[in-house]
Image (cartoon, rainbow, N blue to C red):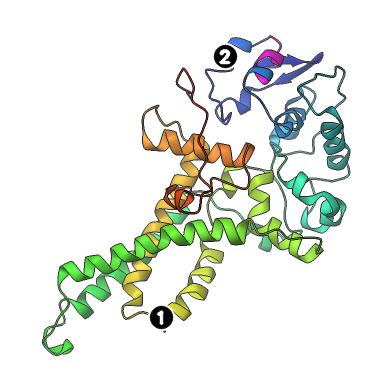
Amino acid sequence: MAEFPVKLDGQTYDLQKFLKDHPGGTNTLKNYKGRSILEAMKKFGHSVSAYHMLKDFKVTDSNLTGAVSENGRIITKEEEDRDVAEIEFLEKLESQLDWSKSILRQMDIVAPHYNKWVNSAVYRRCRLFESPLLENLTYSPWYLVPLFWVPVMLYIGVTEYHRLVLCSEACGGDPMSVWRFCVQIALGMLMWTSLEYSLHRWVFHLDPGTSLNMIKLHFLIHGLHHKTPFDGLRQVFPPFPAAILAWVLYTPASMIFTYPRLLLVGNLIGYLTYDMIHYYVHHGSPKDGTYLYAMKRYHSNHHFVNHDKAFGISSNIWDHVFKTFVHVRRLGFSLQW
């Protein structure tokens, strides 16, 4: 029995598990329980991806528990505001994949149409690797990130404070002032904001072209997040691969900057802030008028409307600088999650 049934084109969908994840809020859906959602879909300009994702909520679909969903939704009524041919094409493409197995090993199926496929979201979990060990390294609950990185930041920060500020004779009688110490950390935090934008825009959204290996790499580092944006176990960067990336970035920086460890602390503070905000804008319930409410709507725009813009997550300052800022549609009411 559907808990929150809605109808479209004669088909019933159960949106109960999707209510809190709905980018447009729960309050925009509550009046459509048991009714057709065609009016809402047209009124709020839903994308092809939204129609495509609906199949994951068919009342006969078991995919919300993590199983393989029924594929190939039949469109029974053509609407002038929908690209029916594209929706049908995506359904046929999706039907060739077995989501209970490694998607990376099936990437050759979608490779010719990768950019279209990866930006057409689904509401399900994805298995990347057949190996349980490798698969376990690709996901993480959000709280493991601060549990891992906060002690690391505190250790580096405290040891550097003793080495540079409280050093007395060990540093030749010229210890660093507390002010300079804090400024170096603040510079590291500022550096992170540009790194966040740069990685997201020029690495995570790099066009993989037609190379199957590049397509697999892209899907592994970021494409997965656009394909399954509601998977709560893959919203944050797992600590182990994050530590490897931090080491790769820190090594050349340690040869350039005078106080690389202080900059590293600042970068890690910025990174942790970013990862927590990223998780929250996907799963949190910010109130209208708050910064996080604005960023939740901004990031939703990046996922479902403008994939090539709105790259800032913790801040949109660099979107302004590089002219990728998006003006999110003004609403006459507040969204609620």
| Mark 1 surroundings: few (<14), some (14-19) or many (≥20) residues within 10 A | some
Residue, disc 2: 30
Instruction: Examine the structure image and report whether residue 127 is included in the region drawn in magenta.
Output: no
| The image quarter in which residue 190 lies | bottom left
Residue, disc 1: 254
Q: Name the spot of residue 56 as percent of width and height, x first.
A: 74, 31
| Mark 2 surroundings: few (<14), some (14-19) or many (≥20) residues within 10 A | few
Q: Name the spot of residue 145 as percent of width and height, x first.
A: 46, 55
Instruction: Examine the structure image and report whether residue 40 is included in the region drawn in magenta.
Output: yes
Q: Residue sitting at 64 percent across and 59 percent down?
A: 221
In terms of secondary structure, where does tag 1 sit?
Answer: loop
Of residues 195 and 102, which is closer to you in this image?
195
Looking at the rendering, the stretch of residues picked out in magenta corresponds to 34-41
Can the viewer see residue 147 in this picture? Answer: no
Q: Name the spot of residue 332 as percent of width and height, x first.
A: 47, 17
Q: Residue sitting at 70 percent across and 17 percent down?
A: 2
Q: Residue sitting at 22 percent across and 70 percent down?
A: 181
Amino acid under label 1? Answer: Ser
